[in-house]
Image (cartoon, grey):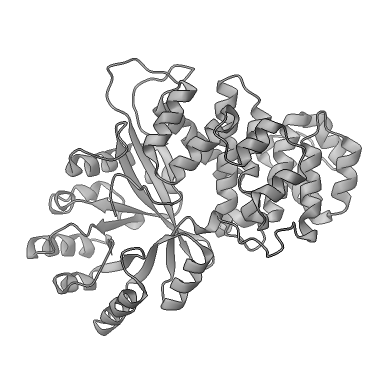
């Protein structure tokens, strides 16, 4: 897997790493050093829980990396140390692509061994010098993964050191994967198998049957649409509530009556309102009281979060975190640009409701009282309302050049957007419902 860019459909979380001061509008002085992006891509287990994150890197405003791979890896290491792995990946492990120099010169020792998995790129020469360096690091507690692996006798000595073997399913078909697994079993390799580029639920189930236990890809945010393409009746209440939350001003009586039909959701919302995040001095016992104390805008955000948590169902918890992340990013960008922050928050959240409810976006849009511009934005139109959401979707898929074009359209620096992205990530992590956060 390329250490710098990921043009395939993957879920990526970006971190801006430009050290230059930002102006309030996101602009910077010309002639300063090129921006850098450090991004993370989740690795999920069979239950959809996050097992680890792979850290990716892109430098400058190019669509792909044209520089020195050694400098790229050094930048990842430097910036990871500066920001701290805890801030980027939380309690999870970080997979980090390594060049030959990073291993031989032991540059990777700046990383905490208990949170680090060193990825050996498929482009490395598996010679005795590299094996000796890896053995020393392994002896000191560092874990290894073979990246984009296809069977090669030259890599056999490394199988005793690796904890993970990553397979790109676009490079190896089912026959080649079966042969690879047979080779690994014959060598008594106990490494966990990671399937990369999982783009659909069908891919996920197929690779799971083949013996893979970990997965990278964008499959979890693509809805499995029911045959009738209609909204399940047990989800209509959630859409009714979302519809009510779009009204201006909010109708307290209507919201209370709707919430009475779902006691579990009402309890979830009241727990959220009373959580330390919102700093309420007195405990709130009713929806009306919550509305009066926090105001319409804050109540919309809290209620949307509660509804999304209830919608989660059997979906991977990381999907809810992504929905919160999108919503918050859209809100932050709108606020900085003097736009309607509440509307943009709803746009970010609604962008993943089809995946949560297993419905089409068309069905969702038809069921909600949205403005024409919002409808078009959710359906993919490249209008101003969609700019921040479009930037985030491109970033999730590693479409770096398109990210930069959107930044230019917004008249802000890409690094500023990336910094808002990190702030939104932290907010999403802090605001995840407790049951989902534990699973993530």
Write down the quadrant of residue 341 in the picture.
top right
The image position of residue 425, as x and y in percent, is 51, 40
Quadrant for the N terminus, please: bottom left
Q: Is residue 342 above or below residue 218?
A: above
Asked if residue 110 can be seen in this view, the reply is yes
Question: Between residues 19 and 364, which one lies in front from this camera angle?
Answer: 364
Question: Between residues 36 and 177, which one lies in front from this camera angle?
Answer: 177
The image position of residue 356, as x and y in percent, is 64, 55
Residue shown at 36%/55% (left/top)? 115
Question: Between residues 85 and 165, which one lies in front from this camera angle?
Answer: 165
Name the side, left or right, on which 415 lies relative to 135: right
Asked if residue 270 can be seen in this view, the reply is no
The image position of residue 177, as x and y in percent, is 33, 74
Residue shown at 85%/35% (left/top)? 289
Write down the quadrant of residue 140 in the picture.
bottom left
Write down the quadrant of residue 419 in the picture.
top left
Name the side, left or right, on which 370 lies relative to 72: right
């Amino acid at each position: 897997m390329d250490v710098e860019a990921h043009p395939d459909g993957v879920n990526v979380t970006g971190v801006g790493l430009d050290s230059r001061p930002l102006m309030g509008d996101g602009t910077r002085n010309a002639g300063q050093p090129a921006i850098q992006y450090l991004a993370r891509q989740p690795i999920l287990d069979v239950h959809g829980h996050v097992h680890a994150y792979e850290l990716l890197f892109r430098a400058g405003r190019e669509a792909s990396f044209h520089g020195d791979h050694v400098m790229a890896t050094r930048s990842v290491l430097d910036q990871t140390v500066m920001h701290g792995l805890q801030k980027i990946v939380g309690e999870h492990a970080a997979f980090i692509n390594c060049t030959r120099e990073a291993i031989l010169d032991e540059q990777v020792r700046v990383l905490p061994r208990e949170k680090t998995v060193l990825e050996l790129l498929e482009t490395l020469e598996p010679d005795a010098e590299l094996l000796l360096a890896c053995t020393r690091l392994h002896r000191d507690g560092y874990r290894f993964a073979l990246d984009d692996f296809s069977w090669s006798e030259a890599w056999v000595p490394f199988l005793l050191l690796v904890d993970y073997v990553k397979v790109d399913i676009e490079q190896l078909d089912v026959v080649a994967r079966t042969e690879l697994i047979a080779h690994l079993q014959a060598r008594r390799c106990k490494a966990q198998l990671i399937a990369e580029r999982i783009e659909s639920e069908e891919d996920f189930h197929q690779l799971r049957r083949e013996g893979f236990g970990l997965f990278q890809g964008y499959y979890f945010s693509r809805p499995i649409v029911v045959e009738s393409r209609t909204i399940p009746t047990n989800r209509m209440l959630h859409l009714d509530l979302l519809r009510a939350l779009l009204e201006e001003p909010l109708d307290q009586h209507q919201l209370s009556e709707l919430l009475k039909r779902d006691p579990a959701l009402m309890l979830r919302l009241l727990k959220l309102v009373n959580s330390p995040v919102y700093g309420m001095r007195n405990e709130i016992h009713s929806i009306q009281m919550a509305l009066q104390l926090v105001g319409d805008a804050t109540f919309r955000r809290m209620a949307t979060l509660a509804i999304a948590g209830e919608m989660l169902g059997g979906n991977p918890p990381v999907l809810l975190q992504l929905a919160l992340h999108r919503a918050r990013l859209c809100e932050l960008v709108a606020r900085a640009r003097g736009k309607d922050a509440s509307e943009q928050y709803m746009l970010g959240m609604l962008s993943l409701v089809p995946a949560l409810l297993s419905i089409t976006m068309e069905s969702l849009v038809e069921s909600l009282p949205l403005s024409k511009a919002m409808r078009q934005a959710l359906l993919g139109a490249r209008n101003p309302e969609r700019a921040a959401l479009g930037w985030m979707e491109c970033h999730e898929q590693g479409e770096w050049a398109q990210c930069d074009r959107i930044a230019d359209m917004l008249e802000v620096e890409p690094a500023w957007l990336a910094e808002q992205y990190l702030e939104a990530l932290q907010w999403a992590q802090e605001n995840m419902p407790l049951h989902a956060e534990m699973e993530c």
